[in-house]
Amino acid sequence: RVLLVESGGGSVQAGESLTLSCIVSGYTYTRGCLAWFRQVPGKEREGVASFDFGTGSTAYGDSVHGRFTISEDNAKNTAYLQMTSLNPEDTAMYYCATRAGDCYNLVPEPENYNYWGQGTQVTVSS
């Protein structure tokens, strides 16, 4: 059974940085894609970034490109989302998700992912 657990969320001021972590267990595929999403109540879940396990390639949504960095530490079975220059529009619940297929260098779409974490809240104050 694949299990994902996010951590690292919190409340910060605009302009500050935060790093989220996602510990993945039970994942036995040799290839696949891990992604971060975020969601604000009343809005659709938005793809933030993706990391391809096979190629190491990454993709980012337009709203976070240049500010957020996705990475993965295979030895620790952990993925990260480094967030810099945070602004109030980044306030959301952040989720990590994974699937067995490649990322194809695409900004992730939630309907393509099978396994999800429970989310971690990020709040940015102006």
Image (cartoon, rainbow, N blue to C red):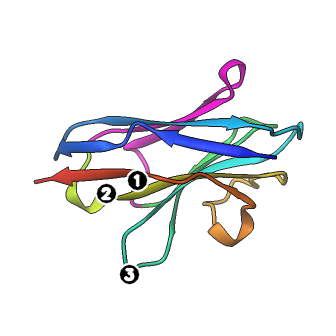
Question: Given this view, does label 3 or label 2 mark the residue nearer the observer?
Answer: 3
The image position of residue 38, as x and y in percent, is 46, 60
| Kind of residue indicated by mark 1 | Val
Callout 2: SS? helix
| Kind of residue indicated by mark 2 | Asp
Q: Gap in Å between the C-alphas at discs 2 and 1?
A: 9 Å
Residue 104 picture quarter: bottom right
As drawn, the label of residue 64 is 1
Near mark 3 (Cα within 10 A), the count class, few <14, some 14-19 or many ≥20, is few
In reply to whether residue 33 is colored magenta, the answer given is no
Earlier-in-chain disc, 3 versus 1? 3
Tell me which residue sits at (42%, 43%) in the image. Answer: 68
Question: Given this view, does label 2 or label 1 mark the residue nearer the observer?
Answer: 2
Q: Mark 3 points at which residue?
A: 42
- Image: magenta residue range: 63-85
Question: Given this view, does label 3 or label 1 mark the residue nearer the observer?
Answer: 3
In front of the other: 5 or 111: 5
Earlier-in-chain disc, 2 versus 1? 1
Label 3 close to label 1 by CB (< 8 Å): no
Q: Mark 2 points at which residue?
A: 90
